[in-house]
Image (cartoon, rainbow, N blue to C red):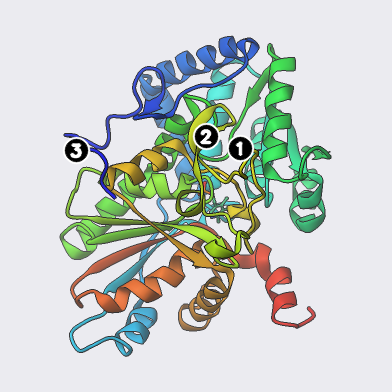
Amino acid sequence: MTLNPAPNSFRTGPDERGRFGIFGGRFVAETLMPLILDLEKAYADAKADPSFKADMESYGTHYIGRPSPLYYAERLTEHLRAQAPAGQGAKIFFKREELNHTGSHKVNNVLGQILLARRMGKPRIIAETGAGQHGVATATLCARFGLKCVVYMGAVDVERQAPNVFRMKMLGAEVIPVQSGTRTLKDAMNEALRDWVTNVSDTFYCIGTVAGPHPYPAMVRDFQSVIGIETKQQMLEMEGRLPDSLIACIGGGSNAMGLFHPFLDDRDVEIYGVEAAGHGVQSGLHAASLTGGRPGVLHGNRTYLLMNEDGQIADAHSISAGLDYPGIGPEHAWLHEMGRVTYLSATDAETLEAFKLCSMLEGIIPALEPAHALSKVMELAPTKPAEHLMVLNLSGRGDKDIPQVAQIFGQTL
Ligand SMILES: *Cc1c(COP(=O)(O)O)cnc(C)c1O
């Protein structure tokens, strides 16, 4: 769907009010505004400071383990070629963000925000978490830099994700179960925003995805863009040219924005985002905000949301707690309307098939989140010519999902 004429560049947003077209912005209480403006200024200063960049690179290398490899998934490629017409079947690569310290891409963003909090002299860090991956990454960096860490987590998720709750506590964080609303991620984010306005002087709010009020969506995207920048370099080294397509799963959309953003103006590169279709978009039990939602305002920005007829935020459903968010980052909403990125969705069942296949063929157990994107690789790759280079963002490892998958497959551990 192309509603607008293509702009000269897809990489210039947001504008000074934090808008990507009609999306984004900062719809926040008056009391929050000074904090948001402080943050915006501190981030602009940090961006212009070479020592901030040097710290990002140094900790990125020695603490997180960057760069992550770009890996040719040879057996998966051959497996899908065997099902494709002669001469077809894309060459598939994994950008291996699951090898980062703490097991996912989340830590790239947390490192940036924690270094920023230190510059701003904020000793107390708060975060929201759903599955617990962002909470664990935040607790980890807080331990490393000796900062107090408070993580808000819906009470339902606290029960579903017990191992990550224990991890956060081991790392010295306080985990606060949120009892309001549906007691899941969106409620945890509400509670964290409330904490922030109450503790203005000493607290930094570390948001886990490309959502929230401006400058978060752009700032988190910038911190995650290391994924796409490395991919570009690595593909040039390996194949002597850019990839033909990129594909990533979408919860709030940070791992996807990180991979996509450096390529947005390379117009020959096809870009696919994959939302969680749960039991199917028609069933109503899903988390596909672009495919099955409409524009509204939540958590300080305008974007596509899952809503009921009264405009109340509807529950998201996904097999993967990390995709279980009723919104999507505003830049994705804009890229969707501009037609630059194609948004697909994958059901729970398709995801489990991809999860099994990746484990068996590549010896890599993926998180359920990127397994959504992988299921669309399985559909798309056989339709492309053999010289087509396709990059999947393998955003996290599957260890955290083993108990859940074992239960689904009817096995006890
Ligand atoms: C949190 C998470 C996601 C979803 O978040 P995005 O902001 O959409 O990237 C995807 N993959 C993994 C492994 C995660 O932990």
Q: CA distance from mark 3 to mark 2?
A: 23 Å
Q: How many residues crowd mark 2 within 10 Å: few (<14), some (14–19), many (20+)? A: some
Q: What residue is disc 2 on?
A: 296
- Relative to the observer, which residue lies in front, 285 or 54? 285
Residue 269, how many percent across, how many down? 22, 55
Mark linked to residue 311? 1
- Relative to the observer, which residue lies in front, 198 or 290? 290
What amino acid is labelled 1 in the image? Gly
Residue 80, how many percent across, how many down? 35, 83
Asked if labels 2 and 3 touch by Cβ distance under 8 angstroms, the answer is: no
The reply to whether residue 395 is in sight is yes
Q: Is residue 361 left or right of residue 199?
A: left
**Residue drawn where x is 43% and y is 25% of the image:** 52
Mark linked to residue 342? none
The reply to whether residue 211 is in sight is no
Asked if labels 3 and 1 touch by Cβ distance under 8 angstroms, the answer is: no
What element does badge 2 sit on? strand
Q: Is mark 1 within 8 Å of ligand 1?
A: no
What element does badge 3 sit on? loop
**Residue drawn where x is 38% and y is 29% of the image:** 22
Q: Quadrant of the C terminus?
A: bottom right
Q: What residue is disc 3 on?
A: 5
Nearest to viewer (mark 1 / mark 3): 1
Residue 100, how many percent across, how many down? 52, 53
**Residue drawn where x is 15% and y is 61% of the image:** 240
What amino acid is labelled 2 in the image? Gly
Asked if labels 1 and 2 touch by Cβ distance under 8 angstroms, the answer is: yes
User: Counting residues from the N terminus, which is met first, the one under dot 2 or under dot 1?
Assistant: 2
What amino acid is labelled 3 in the image? Pro
- Relative to the observer, which residue lies in front, 211 or 66? 211
- Relative to the observer, which residue lies in front, 328 or 320? 328
Residue 283, how many percent across, how many down? 60, 64
